[in-house]
Amino acid sequence: MNHGLLYNVLKAIKPLRALVRSLRSLWQRYRLEAWVLEGAERNSGEAIRVLVVGQVENCNYLARVVFAEGSIAVQRRKMWKHHAWSLLDVPDCPYGLIFIQTDKMLPEPAQAHNRFVVPTWIAGELDVIRALKSPSASTSVKRDVRHIRSSRFQYSTTRDPGAIDRFFADMYLPYIRQTHGDGAFAASLDKFRQEAEKGAELLLVEQDGKAVAGVLLGLNDPERMEALELGVLGADRNLVKAGALAAIYYFSLLHAANRGFRRLFLGARARS
């Protein structure tokens, strides 16, 4: 096949490839992961059957919350989105509980008497100057500063891609996995790199010149710095007790003030 013919063939199949990608995206959007959980309910000991539709982390978390330890059987399946929602209105539904993960708040008519909405995330936002200087915050801030100084913590910032990769592997993943176990919603390394490409900074907490904790800071908003993801070296609980987390938040506030940001955004999972 000559180069001209090959070029024409590739050009002709390009729309077909785009169509395949579009169909795959639709399939992934509406064909959902689902798990059927069966076992003894944690408090009553009675048999219960639960359907969980969404990410595996939610399935793991709910399995621990609902079922007695060691009693659970799990079946994995795929389910169309509309079928999952239709089960909520089935009179003789085979499930005692149905959990469906959604990225949108339901309209009030959809929140019937047998349904409730639990937010996956909560978030907070601090006024940088007020948090550092207001009389009401001065006691806690001074206490944190004393703790930070006694632990010999300092901080530095970097945009070095290699440092961000090391933070992801050595601090972020160990800490989130230890803290949340198999219910952890861990961001990917690609996500970290995407944030870095958009200008994110890595703030590192150092003890005697060694980086022991850190936080990835988003700088997309001219007035608001975002504390995106944090971590502690090796998920070391001794570092946490020494004030590494307090140092992360205090140094983030200090860095935000030095950079002229008015607000610091903090995100956290509701179930944490």
Image (tube, rainbow, N blue to C red):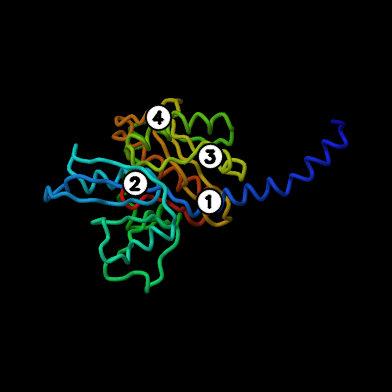
Q: Name the residue under label 2.
A: 35
Could you say where residue 191 lies in the image, as x and y percent from the top left?
53, 41
The amino acid type of the residue labelled 1 equals: Trp
250, above or below 113, in the image: above
Q: How far apart are marks 3 and 2 (CA)?
A: 29 Å
* Crowd class of label 4 (few under 14; some 14 to 19; many from 20; radius 10 Å): many
SS for callout 1: helix
Callout in the foreground (3, 2): 2
Callout in the foreground (1, 3): 1
**14 sits to left or right of 170:** right
Q: Which of marks 4 and 1 is nearer the N terminus?
A: 1
163, above or below 131, in the image: above
Residue 211, quarter of picture: top left
In the image, 140 versus 55, the foreground residue is 55
Callout in the foreground (4, 2): 2
Q: How far apart are marks 2 and 1 (CA)?
A: 18 Å
Q: Earlier in the sequence, mark 2 or mark 1?
A: 1
Q: Mark 4 points at which residue?
A: 233
The amino acid type of the residue labelled 4 equals: Leu
SS for callout 3: helix
